[in-house]
Image (spheres, rainbow, N blue to C red):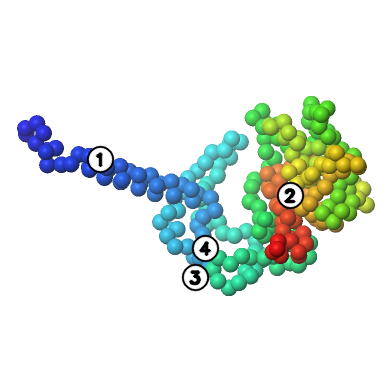
Amino acid sequence: MPKGALTSYLDVAQVVLYAFWIFFAGLIFYLRREDRREGYPLESEVHGGLKGWDWLFIPSPKTFLLADGSAVLAPRPHEGPVGELKAVKVEPWPGAPIVPTATDDSRLADGVGPGAYALRAERPDLTWEGKTRIVPMRVADEFTVAADDPDPRGMPVYGADGVLAGTVTEIWIDRGESLPRYYEMELEGARDRTVLIPVTFADVKRFSQHKKVVVAALLARQFAGVPQPRDPDSITLREEERVIAYYGAGTLYATDRRQEPLL
């Protein structure tokens, strides 16, 4: 065949363009399948079962080996909802928001809305050295509070209603990041009963007339319902999810007024 006989009948640039389009479409299809390994398949609110084209975009299960030697399969096609959904839709149409069915403080622990949480592993997070990552300073005694930072231990804790909820007794440290994660608080009127406060929900008033910690997410009485770790000196990944979710739920459900429009 003479040189150039084939390419003289083909637009090489156009062939390359078509090849790129096919490659790019395949890449998008692959990525859209891979990002559905967790939280899928979705269920249709109208007729149940798989939603739309999920059957096509759900990838085949893949086994992931974790650092601790265990294995996790994702996606898990036969894994359904865990427990009863303690919420109802505010309107009948698909996509309408849901609200907790409970009207008392128990709704903060029902896993609805900002109080939703993932069922992570029932084991503590570990550092690269294999140590428990989040522990109180009574365990991680190599850590101290910087001289220029406020030490919240001994400070009173107030809820959003301005009522005294308890007193900070300890700081829980993240050994991996070298920073505080939780404040341990002894409940007011309940000796030897402690709960954890995520640092991100605690406002340390160091420059006020009386040093104190204010937690705007909860009312004082609602601290008694904060989920407690089984081990007083460590916390599992799932327990962390539930503790933080409880405070998250308080930002919307601590009072009925918080669910109303701002204006």
Q: Secondary structure at mark 1?
A: helix
x, y (%) of residue 214? 82, 47
Separation of marks 1 and 4 at Cα, in angstroms: 40 Å
Residue at 78% across, 37% down = 172
x, y (%) of residue 197? 78, 46
Going by the numbered disc 4, the residue's amino acid type is: Glu
Residue at 73% across, 44% down = 200
Going by the numbered disc 1, the residue's amino acid type is: Val
Q: Point out the frontmost of discs 1 and 4.
A: 1
N-term mark: 4 or 2:
4
Residue 243's disc number: 2
Q: Label 1, on which residue?
A: 16
The answer to which of 98 and 209 lies nearer the viewer is 209
Q: Secondary structure at mark 2?
A: helix
| CB atoms of marks 1 and 2 within 8 Å | no
N-term mark: 1 or 2:
1
N-term mark: 1 or 4:
1
Q: Secondary structure at mark 3?
A: loop
Q: Is residue 153 above or below residue 55?
A: above
Separation of marks 1 and 3 at Cα, in angstroms: 44 Å
Q: Is residue 156 above or below residue 85?
A: above
Residue at 66% across, 28% down = 129
Q: Label 4, on which residue?
A: 43
The answer to which of 27 and 139 lies nearer the viewer is 27
Report whether 166 appears left or right of 4: right
The quadrant where residue 94 appears: bottom right
Q: Label 3, on which residue?
A: 47
N-term mark: 2 or 3:
3
Q: Point out the frontmost of discs 1 and 2.
A: 1
Which residue is at the far left? 2
Separation of marks 2 and 3 at Cα, in angstroms: 35 Å
